[in-house]
Image: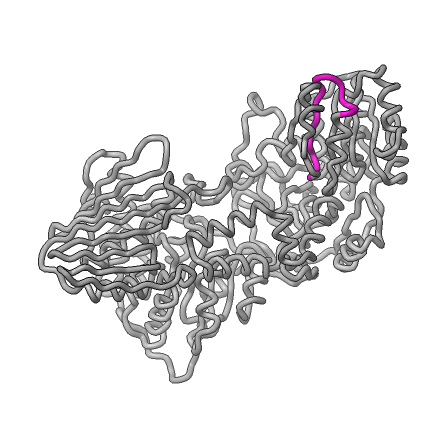
Amino acid sequence: MKQVVQNYKSGELALLDVPVPGCKPGGVLVRTAYSLISTGTELMKVSEAGMSMLGKARSRPDQVAKVVQSVATNGVPATYRKVMGKLDSYTPLGYSLCGVVEQVGDGIDDVKAGDLVACAGNEHALHAELNWVPKNLYTPVPDSLAPRHAAFGTVGSIALQGVRQGESRLGEVALVVGLGLIGQLVAQLLTASGVRVVGADPDPARCELAERLGAVACGDPASPAVESAVAELTDGHGVDQVYLAAGGGSNQPVELAARLCRDRGRVVDIGKCRLDLPWNAYYEKELDVRFSRSYGPGRYDPEYEIEGRDYPIGYVRWTERRNLACFLDLVARGRVDVEPLITRTADFDDAVETYQRLKDGELKAVAVLFRYPEQVAEDGPSADAPVVSVPVVPGGARSSAPVRAAKTPVRLAFVGAGNYATSMLLPHLARRDGVELSTVVTTTALSAANAQRKFGFREATTDLDAVLGDASVDAVFVVTRHSSHAELTRKALLAGKAVFVEKPLALTSQELTGVLDAVEESGNDRLQVGFNRRFAPLLQEARKRFGARTGPASLRYLVNAGRLDHGSWYLQQGTEGSRFAGEGGHFVDTASWLLGADPVSVYALAPSGNEDLQVVLGYPDGSTATISYVTTGAAGFPKETLDLVADGKVLQLDDFVRSSVYDGRKRWVSSRLPKARDKGQAAELAAFVRAVRSGGPMPVPLRSLVATTAATLAVRAALAGGAPVTLAEAR
């Protein structure tokens, strides 16, 4: 299928061939009939992509701050790869469309194949021939409403939410600053609710259009016409509300709002304009400044948008989805007229040319629609992860595989191509001799196409079964969200593939059982989990220098994990597990490797009110390892520090920048520049590829992988019971 994309680094726009998205549970696969270009938001994004790197940085200071923090935590090379990976990738455009339901996912009963729906979301209502859309981001289209008009649903919801934030009342007077697409819709919605509207925009054509659609008077904000109209309509008191629907770097809109708003009036920001509030003017009138966040309640909440959990109507009357349905109803009943706003309807095949004409100013438009050709969609894979129990490691599995023929490349497939895969794994594999990147599989079409373009995969697809059935694929990398790891690993093992799965291997003991059942059923134990820290050069050398132990050891591991950004999928504990369940295996594995044994007991404590954990692991020889996993520490402090004490010796690790060993009066120190921080990914991948090529044992024994996973999962049981848990009980 085709999709409009842009490379944010170069500014390149393209109509790209990408795989068809799969129809996952909780949503529908929609074939697009019309999609709407947001001539404000989207053109701003297109314009930013054409800026220099300095210009991009100036336009997004929030992202610059994140980069600076990442440098402090992860070093320059890792941060550079991460940033360049994001910049030098195709990103999607679009967020408002209407289309026909092609396929219905499990759990959906309010629409069926063939129904017309309006869809929202900058990840789900893209300029693409097919989109997978979760339940709360689509709504059925009224029978009397034309598809081209229903494509305005998302943008209309943004305008509607802004009007709701203004709390307009019958007979009031409102000023709308900026008469682009959003401003025109705001003006019509206000007029439909009995509010008299004055508009301000420097474009005479837009002013004329707004007046034709119901505004009382409109004019250039720099002229006296707007101020005179306000004075006449309000007897000199000023308007009751001002809606800022303008963009750009001028501070004129907020200054105009202060001048023309009445005492204790309301100013609602809908667009993205400069907001240097003149303090005296806003203070003296005690103006109420409000922000309108996109389509309404539910926006940016993954539980609402992705998982489909609705807000009770008694507590939240107007959600994203209900706003979408309300706007479509207003258009269907003639209360809002969107047809006059359509400047051009372009064929989807002409998308790149259309964007370029808009960007260059050759095409001046309020609203532009893409019209799509009819095509036959391909079904995508869909699977639910099973829930089973955790057994002991089965015996009788094969420990080696056939040795590959000389000079034959090791063929690898990737399931998932997110940020970690593209910044920390694929760059190492793409430049390794004797490795062929065969196929990349993702649920979203564009991420597969990006990975194929950047790393040279032979194929990109959304069909996992086709990859597992491909006899030429030697190994499968599972680099998806945590909740899918166990099931994907199980399938790959049953298909006879060697498997590299990023941590965690499983989120429950039942999932771990499923993986080990697959090992027993297939006789295939060719499995490696991405516990890379034991392969880190500094830690490897320090362990060698420390030498063998004769007595029990005490290990302390401080993990300054920090807080996650709001909206991170790591916070979706209902589906993706706790942060420690997802990440803790790294630290358990490192401790066990340093101590040369698997843990036999787990004890855990957690302060109330945050995600901080104290985990104590017990080992057969009496050694202990304490992992302090904290989210409340200082952002500038190193993420990982470790001390190992035994037999009069001390091993220290300082965030993979420096390691030291103290032995009596001797001291050995090895260090590297922070920008060269190496957590072992390259060495781990090299060991895995060697094992696949030679048919020898996997880099880490399966028994150790299972013990680490079981210990990580046992933390939850230890917290619930308030007492140590043995791993035998945890299984």
Q: Please give left or right for residue 548 compared with residue 392 in the image.
A: left
Count of numbered tags: 0
Location of residue 629 (image quadrant): top left
Location of residue 353 (image quadrant): bottom right
Q: Is residue 253 above or below residue 564?
A: above
> Does residue 494 show up?
no
Where in the figure is residue 199, as x and y percent of width and height? 83, 30
Q: Main secondary structure of the magenta part?
A: strand
Tell me the quadrant of the picture where the N terminus can be found.
Answer: bottom right
**Which residue is at 20% across, 66% downward?**
545
Where in the figure is residue 295, as x and y percent of width and height? 65, 35
Stretch in magenta? 259-272
> Does residue 528 show up?
yes
Q: Please give left or right for residue 36 compared with residue 72 in the image.
A: right
Q: Is residue 729 above or below residue 165?
A: below
Where in the figure is residue 532, as x and y percent of width and height? 34, 60
**Which residue is at 47% across, 63% downward?**
414
Where in the figure is residue 268, as x and y percent of width and height? 69, 28
Q: Please give left or right for residue 596 compared with residue 713 in the image.
A: left
Q: Please give left or right for residue 261 compared with residue 446 in the image.
A: right
Location of residue 658 (image quadrant): bottom left
